[in-house]
Image: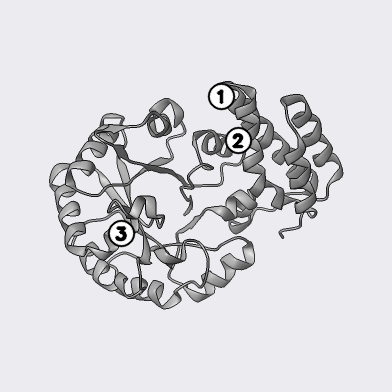
């Protein structure tokens, strides 16, 4: 199985729906976390989970909570929307989250996590998976957390084997992930630093028991990577056609839902910080994109890029 990781600001419902429409190579899309402000879910979060924005039936919402009250409120909402599975975020490393006792901060409080999980399974007939780090301050924290996780009938455990203090840089704690493979009741899902087919092959050799993979930035940088992992190779012209179709569909949808064209263009320009990696002259392509200011210029500029720039060979 190949899953799309939840990346705030990028893998929103426009991206998820368009990717499924054009490529159909991901088994499930994890919705970037929703959380509460006070006792309410903000509109920017709720629009990501409403059923009409997730018609393909492959979306799994992720929640960010600090206690039993918050997990009750969020899971009640998701249940009412018809979701059958929820993912609990134990991995977000950013201080604005961890300072509130959420995300990877819960890895330092196994007793509190156990109370939250016990409450969930007593209250809801929903599947629950978790997405976690190897630890908050040290990779050794995973050992106590796994003892807690093994006490509950979790649907799955997705592990990014870094600690929170690293954010998304630095070494992968391979020994921590191997500990999880050896001690979890279910084989975990691997997540982290798979940006190419070579990366995937390396981790496959390193962890031969792993059959399920979560990719995030790797898909944003190479939309064909999930297909390639499954043995599907695209001719050059088909790649160009699919990429251009993908871009046009996203642009049209952002224009449709945005308050003004400027916001839609800004959104697409942010997206090109990853999308430009499809081209050999990545830096030059990104520089061109940043200069484009409105829809007509963006359309003309994009057509020029796709007709003149050479695609990277990821085979």
User: What is the x, y in percent for residue 10?
Assistant: 54, 42
- Label 1, secondary structure: give it: loop
The correct choice, above or below, for 35 with respect to 293 in the image is below
- Label 3, secondary structure: give it: helix
The correct choice, above or below, for 231 with respect to 126 in the image is below
Question: Looking at the image, which residue is at 30% across and 59% down?
Answer: 105
Is residue 185 in sight in this rendering? yes
Is residue 125 in sight in this rendering? no
Within 10 Å of disc 3 (Cα), the crowding (few <14, some 14-19, many 20+) is many
Q: Which residue is mark 2?
A: 267
Q: Tell me whether the residue at label 1 lies in contact with that at label 3, contact meaning CB atoms closer than 8 angstroms.
A: no
Asked which quadrant contains residue 123, the reply is: top left
User: What is the x, y in percent for residue 162?
Assistant: 44, 67
Q: Would residue 10 appear left or right of 133 to someone viewing this image?
A: right
Q: Earlier in the sequence, mark 3 or mark 2?
A: 3
Within 10 Å of disc 1 (Cα), the crowding (few <14, some 14-19, many 20+) is few
Q: Quadrant of the C terminus?
A: bottom right
- Residue furthest left in the image: 122
Q: Which residue is mark 1?
A: 258
Q: Earlier in the sequence, mark 1 or mark 3?
A: 3
- Label 2, secondary structure: give it: helix
Instruction: Kindly report the distance in space between the C-alpha atoms of the residues bearing marks 3 and 2.
Output: 30 Å
- Residue furthest bottom in the image: 175
Asked which quadrant contains residue 22, the reply is: top right
Q: Tell me whether the residue at label 1 lies in contact with that at label 2, contact meaning CB atoms closer than 8 angstroms.
A: yes
Q: Would residue 180 appear left or right of 273 to someone viewing this image?
A: left
Q: Tell me whether the residue at label 3 lies in contact with that at label 2, contact meaning CB atoms closer than 8 angstroms.
A: no
| The label number, if any, that marks residue 12 in the structure image | none
Question: Looking at the image, which residue is at 80% across and 50% down?
Answer: 284
Q: Which residue is mark 3?
A: 105
Instruction: Kindly report the distance in space between the C-alpha atoms of the residues bearing marks 1 and 2.
Output: 10 Å
């Amino acid at each position: 199985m190949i899953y799309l990781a939840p990346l705030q600001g990028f893998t929103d419902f426009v991206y998820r729906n368009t990717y499924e429409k054009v490529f159909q190579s991901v088994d499930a899309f994890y919705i970037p976390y929703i959380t509460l402000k006070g006792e309410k879910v903000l509109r920017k979060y709720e629009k990501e989970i409403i059923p009409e924005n997730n018609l393909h039936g492959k979306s799994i919402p992720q929640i960010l909570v600090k206690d039993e009250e918050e997990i009750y409120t969020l899971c009640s909402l998701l249940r009412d929307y018809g979701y059958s599975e929820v993912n609990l975020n134990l991995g977000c490393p950013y201080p604005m989250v961890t300072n509130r006792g959420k995300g990877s901060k819960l890895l330092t409080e196994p007793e509190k996590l156990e109370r939250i999980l016990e409450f969930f399974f007593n209250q809801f007939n929903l599947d629950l998976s978790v997405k976690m780090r190897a630890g908050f301050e040290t990779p050794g924290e995973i050992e106590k957390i796994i003892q807690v996780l093994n006490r509950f009938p979790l649907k799955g455990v997705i592990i990014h084997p870094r600690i929170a203090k690293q954010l998304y840089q630095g070494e992968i704690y391979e020994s921590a992930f191997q500990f999880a493979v050896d001690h979890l009741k279910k084989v975990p899902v691997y997540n982290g630093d798979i940006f190419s087919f070579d990366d995937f092959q390396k981790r496959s050799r390193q962890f031969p028991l792993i059959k399920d993979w979560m990719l995030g930035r790797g898909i944003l940088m190479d939309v064909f990577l999930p297909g390639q992992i499954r043995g599907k190779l695209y001719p050059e012209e088909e790649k160009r056609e699919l990429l251009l179709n993908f871009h046009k569909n996203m642009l049209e949808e952002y224009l449709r839902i945005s308050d003004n064209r400027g916001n839609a263009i800004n959104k697409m320009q942010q997206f090109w910080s990853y999308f430009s990696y499809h081209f050999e002259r990545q830096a030059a392509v990104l520089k061109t994109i940043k200069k484009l200011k409105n829809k007509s210029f963006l359309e003309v500029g994009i057509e020029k890029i796709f007709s003149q720039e050479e695609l990277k060979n990821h085979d």
